[in-house]
Amino acid sequence: MERDAGGHTLPPMTGNMRVLVAGGGVAALEAVLALRALAAGLVDVELLAPTVDFPQRPLSVRSPFSGESAPQASFDRIPLVHHRGALAVVDDGVVVTTDGGRLRYDRLIVATGAHAVDAVHGATTFRGPVSAGAVEAALAHERVVFAAPDASWTLPLYELALLAGRPGVTIVTPEPRPLDAFGSLASDAVARLLESAGVRFIGETVPDAVLGDALITRDGRMIEADAVIALPRLEPRPIGGLPDGFLEIDEHARVVGAPGVFAAGDMTAGPVKQGGLATQQADAAAEQIAFEAGAGNQPRPYRPVLRALLLTGGVPLYLRSGPGGPAQVSRSPLWWPSTKVVGRYLTGYLAGGHA
């Protein structure tokens, strides 16, 4: 009898393609749901993750103000084999887990995310739900600076500043304009929001460290601050047998130089790391795997569409940028359901639909 990484007896092998999804976030959940929808009866999907539950991180910006925890997402309504553990090594059709277990696969989807590390020395780092208390304490000060170490995905910084709802708040970011990734139309709209809320914007500036009552920037400037709240820097998780650094993928989310291996989410190379893009990569991987399993579908390439629901403390702002038309910004929803993380299969599942 075959056993999983924890020593549990596994179901007997079938003639189906065996797909292992490694990871426990939105990219992994979207991949599992997509594979079930596209290739039911053709693939056996297994999950390698420490747990089946995880917080909906994009909503955690509310926690320092509301005192409520971010809502949870879960794989618990999906019938699949769950191996508790994490990915350590990939070796030609076999993965080794961090506790020494070995699992076979025909196709592997790496959705393990990235390491979030402190990037501004001396600042309070916002890491999502676990940071609510520390951020709440920092917000009690008069002069609060929100700092981004890079321009990868700065939206939470703007939400925290706007939700604070008071003057004396400053945003420091390498971006030349607010949320510049969405283009000038959206950037102008966000700039007006910041001005109305009394939030000062300092762009084209890289924060470095907190010294006394000031934020020191990389170019040597000092910005007065009683407290600094910074986003972390994301670094790749090392996985034996795969290329070093963030993983390069092709238009069908296949890892370059690693046959049979796909990747989705923050572990992939790219200028922007965001949950909505992660679900689109997961869909591209699932469609290609379904095609290879004989589902008869035509796999669509990954063409990133950037969507964001910006929480403002009032009416939210909807932003969209990507192929198929000009960038859009609106007070009315630009997609439906108008959720923070958009996934072709994930959105309905989180809303209570069937797996």
Image (tube, rainbow, N blue to C red):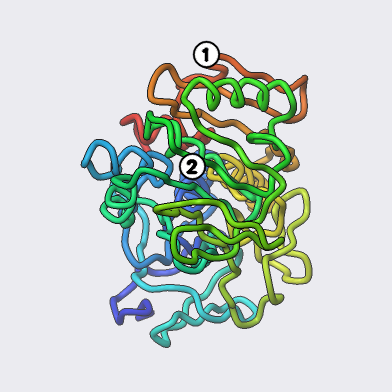
Quadrant housing residue 134: bottom left
Quadrant housing residue 301: top right
Q: Residues within 10 Å of mark 2 (few under 14, many from 20)?
A: many
Say whether residue 281 is left or right of residue 22. Answer: right
Residue 9, percent from left and from top: 30, 75
Decide which of 79, 12 is in the foreground and name it.
Answer: 79
Residue 6, percent from left and from top: 31, 79
Would residue 19 be visible to someone looking at this image? Answer: no
Q: Residue at x 58, y 61 (%)?
A: 216
Quickly name the residue at label 2: 156
Decide which of 261, 154 is in the foreground and name it.
Answer: 154
Q: Residue furthest left?
A: 67
Sequence order check: which comes first, mark 1 or mark 2? 2
Q: Residue at x 57, y 62 (%)?
A: 234
Q: Quadrant location of the C terminus?
A: top left
Residue 255, percent from left and from top: 71, 63
* Kind of residue sitting beneath label 2: Pro
Q: Secondary structure at mark 1?
A: loop
Q: Residues within 10 Å of mark 1 (few under 14, many from 20)?
A: few
Q: Residue at x 35, y 63 (%)?
A: 82
Residue 150, percent from left and from top: 64, 54
The numbered mark at residue 331 is: 1
Q: Secondary structure at mark 2?
A: helix
